[in-house]
Structure formats: structure tokens, C-alpha cells
Image: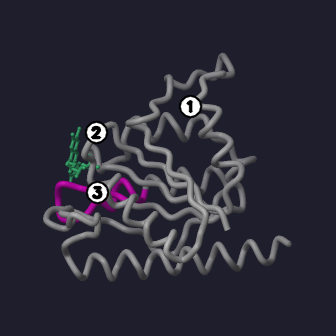
Amino acid sequence: MKITLIAGSNRKDATSTKLLHYIRSLMQTEGIGVTLIDLYETPLPFYSADETSSHPHVKHLLEAVSQADGLVLATPEYHGSISGVLKNALDYVSGSIVGGKPVLSVSSAGGAVGVSSLTQLQAIVRNLHGINSPEWISIGSSQRFFDEDGAPLDEPTRVRVTQALNQFIRLTTALKASAV
Ligand SMILES: Cc1cc2nc3c(=O)[nH]c(=O)nc-3n(C[C@H](O)[C@H](O)[C@H](O)COP(=O)(O)O)c2cc1C
């Protein structure tokens, strides 16, 4: 199984990206192949429908999404929505490479929860004909602290992340098996 994770923050020490790194480590422990695209480290030019971009970061993004059996998308909660850099990345992506694939959406918010961005992210996934995983993951406020190994300090948060991730892995496994 191959999973592509997209970190949708434009900030060096982003907590949404730290959460994605933690999710990646859990999947690697399960022997799952993962590719993580950090939009801070590999920024994309602004999408334009007028031209096909030959930028290497765009090429890498599209290949990683195409080859994946499932996706994990992470966003900071910005003004009740997703980040501009994640929306820009998703504008490059079409239903032809996302359609039928499970997608787990995760967010980090300054407030208690960041479900407004998650609701909007799931709407974008729906419009890309992806399959939204039944659970999403929101961390907010003091749940955004991580230990030196990269795990959330808050134990209930670690439990929630594991449960949502297991559900996503089960869904991806079932869909991959049924496609063969
Ligand atoms: C432009 C901007 C808008 C924000 N809007 C919200 C918001 O609507 N709700 C909220 O709870 N936090 C909001 N925040 C706080 C961020 O969600 C919070 O700092 C979050 O942890 C950022 O994620 P990151 O650590 O991955 O960058 C906002 C922060 C910025 C910079």
C-alpha cells in the first residue's frame, strides 16, 4: 500500500506538519509505503488554468498523488477555512488521479477545534471524486504540543489519531483489494 501525505502549511514549525510527521511514523511502523510532500519545503507556483506547469515540484506532486492508494491532507485552520497553499496544490490535482481513493483530512487550529477547514477540505475531496474517510482529525489549542519524538503530548489526542488512522488504513486496504 502506498500513501501520499500533503502538508498544507507555509510555516517552518507548523503543528499541522508535525501531526502529519507523526501519522507518517505510525504508518511506517505498519510497513506502509509513504511519500510526504511538505508545501513549505517544496513550494508550488500559483496554479493557472492557462498553462501546464513544468515545475519539478508540480511534477513530483502529481506523480505522488497518481501513484498513491490513498491520501492524507493536512491544513492549518485559516479564517475558518483551509490554507491558501493547500488549496493551490489541490487546484493542480484532478479527479482522474484522486477519484475512488480514500482521503483522510487533518487540521490544526488555534481554537479548540478546526472542523470548519475539515468540512471544506472534505467538500473539495468530494469534488475530486475521492472517498472521505469516516473520521477526520482536528487538533487545537493545547493539543498542538509534541514531544521530542514527535508524538502529541496529549494522550487522548494520540488515541484519537490512532483510531482515525486505523479506520483510514482499513478503508484503503479494502478498496485496494476490491480493485484487484
Ligand atoms: C491567517 C490566520 C488565520 C487563522 N484563523 C484561525 C481560525 O479561523 N480559527 C482558529 O481556530 N485559528 C486560526 N488561526 C490560528 C491557526 O489555526 C493556528 O495557529 C494553527 O495551529 C496553525 O497551524 P500550523 O501550526 O500548522 O501553522 C489562524 C492563523 C492565521 C495565521
Compared to residue 47, the image places residue 157 above or below, namely below
Compared to residue 65, the image places residue 118 above or below, namely below
Ligand 1 closer than 8 Å to label 2 CB:
yes
Between the residue at mark 2 and the residue at mark 3, the CA separation in whole angstroms equals 13 Å
Q: Residue 7: percent from the left, percent from the top?
A: 42, 48
Residue with the mark numbered 1:
57
Label placed on residue 11:
2
Residue with the mark numbered 3:
108
Q: Which amino acid does label 1 sit on?
A: His
Residue count near mark 2 (Cα–Cα under 10 Å), binned few <14, some 14–19, many ≥20: some
Q: The magenta stretch spans which residues?
A: 107-119
Residue count near mark 1 (Cα–Cα under 10 Å), binned few <14, some 14–19, many ≥20: some
Asked if residue 111 is among those painted magenta in the image, a careful observer would answer: yes
Compared to residue 107, the image places residue 83 above or below, namely above
Q: Which amino acid does label 3 sit on?
A: Ser
Q: Which residue is drawn at 65% across and 17% down?
A: 50
Residue 40 position by quadrant: top left
Residue count near mark 3 (Cα–Cα under 10 Å), binned few <14, some 14–19, many ≥20: many
Relative placement, left or right, of 167 versus 180 is: left
Query: Callout 2: helix, strand or loop?
Result: loop
Q: Which of marks 3 and 1 precedes in the sequence?
A: 1
Relative placement, left or right, of 74 versus 32 is: left
Q: Are marks 1 and 3 in contact (CB under 8 Å)?
A: no
Which mark is nearer the camera, 2 or 3? 2
Q: Which amino acid does label 2 sit on?
A: Arg
Query: Callout 1: helix, strand or loop?
Result: helix
Ligand 1 closer than 8 Å to label 3 CB:
yes
Q: Which residue is drawn at 40% across and 59% down?
A: 20
